[in-house]
Image (cartoon, grey):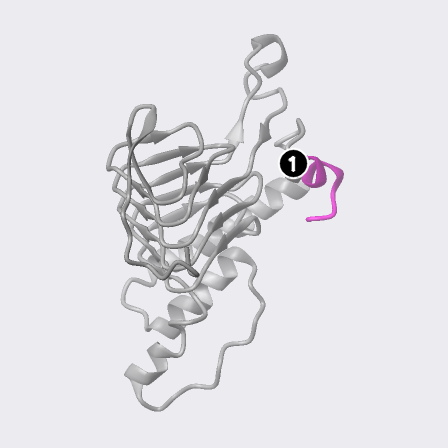
Amino acid sequence: MTTSKEWAKMLRGELYKPWDEDLQANRTRCRKACDEFNAARDATRRQKVELWRKIIGDTRPLPPVNANPKEDEELFDETDPFVDGPISVDHGLNFKVGAGTFLNFNLLVLDTCLITIGERVLFGPNVSLYGVIHPLDPAVRQGMKGPEAGKEIHIEDDVWIGGNVIILAGVRVGKGSTIGAGSVVTRDVPPFHFAAGNPARAIKQIESKMDPEQR
């Protein structure tokens, strides 16, 4: 399904046909995987990692089971994010999340193009990542019959995204930054800045004790 012409155009940010059969097949796959993840509210960390990896198409083998439940959970601290469902992801295969990141409940991801989230990132609840765009001209848009496109979204390491934040297509949030709750992020946020508002704007620089080499 990821070899179709429409899939390739979608990833390049070009106009593509969203009702392409291969794209719809992957959406169906991803929706079912999200449903399984969301239903597993009381599953172990290992079980939830396995279900999460099905959503994003991560085929890495899981490490051998540790007989100690706590130590078994800790096996995934350096390899996978912690995801608190329910979540809704469009394609999954274009969604990359770093280790040690926390994704809070009611996350919505439209990963038309690549969406990356770095390591040690914190998400509040009800965050939406809109990687899809539509033509402004209604003659081109044609309601549900016309094409759509997308732009990549990148959230770098050590970012904190407050609750109810919306991040639009084409945005990069720089390392160490914080986005205030309820913000709509329409443009890039520099590293180590606090941004908030609708549209969000950089309000102040964040002073950090982080090792300069890590910055």
Q: Position of residue 127 (x, y in %)?
A: 33, 41
Q: Is residue 106 left or right of residue 97?
A: left
Residue at x-position 74% and y-position 47% = 3
In the rendered image, the vertical position of residue 207 relative to residue 50, given as above or below: above
In the structure shown, which secondary structural element does the residue marked by tag 1 occupy? helix
Q: Position of residue 167 (x, y in %)?
A: 40, 35
* Mark count: 1
Residue at x-position 58% and y-position 40% = 113
Q: Is residue 108 left or right of residue 148?
A: left
Quadrant in which residue 67 is drawn: bottom left
Q: Position of residue 114 (x, y in %)?
A: 56, 44
Q: Is residue 47 left or right of residue 11?
A: left
Circle 1 residue: 10
Instruction: Give the farthest residue toward the bottom.
Output: 67
Position of the C terminus by quadrant: bottom left
The part of the chain drawn in magenta is 1-9
Residue at x-position 49% and y-position 56% = 55
Q: Is residue 79 left or right of residue 204?
A: right
Quadrant in which residue 100 is drawn: bottom left
Q: Amino acid at mark 1?
A: Met
